[in-house]
């Protein structure tokens, strides 16, 4: 079992899994923002994609300079932010349905890409374990 664990944790699988979790959590926040776009006083929430990607990038660099299995990606999570883009109305709400829908679409595409990459990695692993060439 340690062999399979090493196979899964030494490649890009942990990065893809974290990306999948991040995009799922971010999608919930964006959906909540869309539902509450006309709620007076509602403050939008989001997770910074740039910050999340920076954390992943730094961890990959750390893993390159460390021994096998010494660096984990399990603790990398998105950080809640309150974006201030768009028009700020008198109730301090910065509703912009166009921005929200754009961000939701981009996030959904990132989520789908992560699912597809993970699916292909597991299919390759399954093929290797069955000793078949596809």
Image: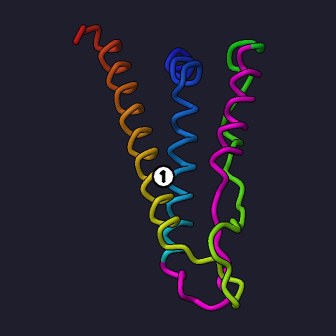
- Which stretch did the figure color magenta? 35-64
Q: Secondary structure at mark 1?
A: helix
Find disc 1 in the rendering and name its residue: 107
Other residues around mark 1 within 10 Å, as few (<14) / some (14–19) / many (≥20)? some
Report the residue at 65% width, 57% height from top.
Answer: 47
Where is residue 10 drawn, in percent x and y?
59, 19
Estimate the x, y position of residue 126 in percent, counting from the top left. 33, 21
Residue drawn where x is 41% and y is 47% of the image: 109
**x, y (%) of residue 17?**
52, 38
Residue 96: x and y, percent?
54, 73
Residue at horizontal 35%, vertical 33%? 119
- Work out which quarter of the rendered image holds the C terminus and state it: top left
Q: Is residue 57 magenta?
A: yes
Q: Residue 84 occupies which quadrant of the picture? A: bottom right
In-front residue for pair 40/7? 40
Q: In the rendered view, does 37 fall on the left or right side of 126? A: right
Q: Is residue 120 magenta?
A: no
The residue lying furthest to the front in this view is 87
Relative to residue 11, is residue 79 depicted above or below? below
With respect to residue 38, does 45 lie above or below?
Answer: above
Residue depicted at 40% across the width and 39% down the height: 113
Image side of residue 134 versus residue 73, left or right: left
């Amino acid at each position: 079992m340690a062999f399979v664990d090493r196979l899964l944790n030494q490649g890009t699988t942990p990065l893809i899994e974290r990306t999948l979790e991040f995009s799922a959590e971010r999608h919930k926040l964006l959906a909540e923002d869309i539902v509450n776009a006309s709620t007076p006083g509602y403050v939008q929430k989001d997770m910074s994609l740039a910050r999340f990607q920076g954390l992943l990038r730094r961890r990959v660099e750390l893993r390159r300079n460390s021994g096998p299995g010494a660096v984990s990606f399990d603790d990398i999570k998105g950080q809640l932010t309150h974006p201030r883009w768009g028009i700020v109305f008198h109730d301090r709400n910065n509703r912009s349905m166009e921005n929200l829908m754009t961000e939701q679409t981009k996030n959904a595409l990132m989520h789908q890409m992560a699912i597809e990459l993970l699916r292909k990695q597991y299919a390759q692993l399954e093929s290797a374990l069955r000793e078949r060439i596809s």
